Amino acid sequence: MTGRLDPLFSRTLPEGDTHQRDVCDHCGFVAYENPKIVVGSVVTHRGKVLLCRRAIEPRHGYWTVPAGYLELGETPEEGARREAREEANADLELHGLLAVYTVRRLSQVQLIYRATLADGVFSPGTESLETQLFDWDAIPWDDLAFPTVHWMLGHQRAFEAGKGVGPFGNPVGAD
């Protein structure tokens, strides 16, 4: 070949596949699009829950747990720990998978762990305006960033009360 070959994709059903895909007309490369994996933790310390007020969109200014997208080459546990360091300057001890949620409209799968602060130390990271430990009855429920944060906190509370061992999933009818 004498020049650069730019890919040209057509939407088609590859042989032996069950879904329409973008396939390169020149070489047959299939460009798979798969769900994004989100990892995070419900972090507790001395009976309180760590929340981070978001400094970024979406939902700037609302409260969430430390969570974000899993990076390439990273285990889910490593990702959950990294997100806690980035958002709350916190080192975690993970205690198992709390929940697996599906957010179909965003093509997300969320893996959420139960965790505690390894040393009790935390502060706002670059993606957080502030971080705070909340008693359960002081959680700012109306200012939580996403429906899944409500689910996570509810499932953590159920776990603590012995009403399930996890991993939990989406509430009935929620996706």
Image: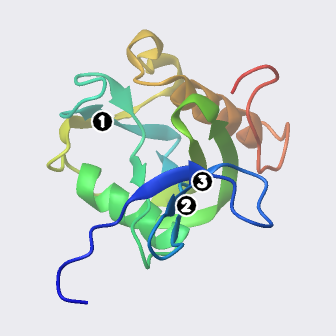
Q: Classify mark 1: helix, strand or loop.
A: strand
Q: Earlier in the sequence, mark 3 or mark 1?
A: 3
Q: Position of residue 70 (x, y in %)?
A: 44, 61
Quarter of the image with the C terminus is top right
Q: Classify mark 3: helix, strand or loop.
A: strand
Give the class, few, some or many, for how many residues have Cα within 10 Å of label 2's Cα (few <14, many ≥20).
few
Q: Is residue 169 left or right of residue 67?
A: right
Q: Earlier in the sequence, mark 1 or mark 2?
A: 2
Q: Position of residue 129 (x, y in %)?
A: 16, 34
Q: Classify mark 2: helix, strand or loop.
A: loop
In the figure, 148 relative to 109: above or below?
above
For disc 2, the marked residue is 32
Q: Quadrant of residue 150?
A: top right
- Most extreme residue toward the top is 142
* Amino acid bearing label 3: Arg
Q: Is residue 92 left or right of residue 108?
A: left
| Residue 147 visible in the displayed image | yes
Asked if labels 1 and 3 touch by Cβ distance under 8 angstroms, the answer is: no
Closer to the eye: label 3 or 2: 3
* Amino acid bearing label 1: Gln
For disc 1, the marked residue is 132
Q: CA distance from mark 1 to mark 2?
A: 40 Å
For disc 3, the marked residue is 21
Q: Position of residue 64 (x, y in %)?
A: 39, 33
In the figure, 38 relative to 172: above or below?
below
Asked if labels 2 and 3 touch by Cβ distance under 8 angstroms, the answer is: yes
